[in-house]
Image (cartoon, grey):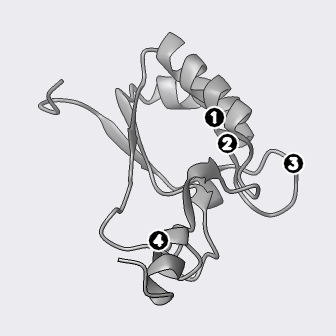
Amino acid sequence: MGFHNKVIYQLYPKSFYDSNGDGVGDLRGIIDKIDYLKSLHVDMIWFNPFFVSPQYDNGYDVADYRQIDPRFGTMADFDELAKKLKAAGIDIMLDMVLNHTSTEHAWFQKALAGDK
């Protein structure tokens, strides 16, 4: 899939839409706003990180790439979001920074302990 002539909407879940009133945007909030995104003729959403993170670096200090940060929702929320975006004709791009992690990530902890 090419990006030529695509409308790509960069979305930072933390500040997009708060569905439960806790002051933090979340995946359910994005689900609630799919019609809004569709009205903008968005072809793809570029998600900033929403993985487990201590949030020292706006989510780019990922502690676990396999889990959704509970502040933003659950894996079930993400599955529902992905299905509803697909049904709306909106593709997904995840911002995954794999060249560094949080000091809380298992890879960092193993390296710190001397594991190569």
For marks 4 and 1, the one nearer the N-term is 1
Q: Which mark is residue 78?
A: 1
As drawn, 47 above or below 44: below
Q: Upstream in the sequence, badge 1 or badge 3? A: 3
Disc 2 residue type (three-letter): Leu
Estimate the spatial distance between the alpha carbons at disc 4 and disc 2, rounded to whole Å.
27 Å
Q: Is residue 15 visible?
A: no
Residue 111 percent coordinates (x, y): 43, 82
Q: Position of residue 44 (x, y in %)?
A: 36, 32
Percent of width and height locating residue 36: 57, 30
The quadrant the C terminus occupies is bottom left
Q: Confirm or deny contact between disc 4 and disc 2 (CB under 8 A).
A: no
What is the quadrant of the N terminus in the image? top left
Q: Which residue is mark 3?
A: 20
Q: Residue at the spot x=67%, y=42% of the render? A: 27
Q: Residues within 10 Å of mark 1 (few under 14, many from 20)?
A: some
Q: Choose mark 1 or mark 3, whichever is in front.
A: 1
The numbered mark, 2 or 1, whose residue comes first in the sequence reads 2
Q: Amino acid at mark 1?
A: Phe
For residue 86, side relative to residue 17 (left or right): left
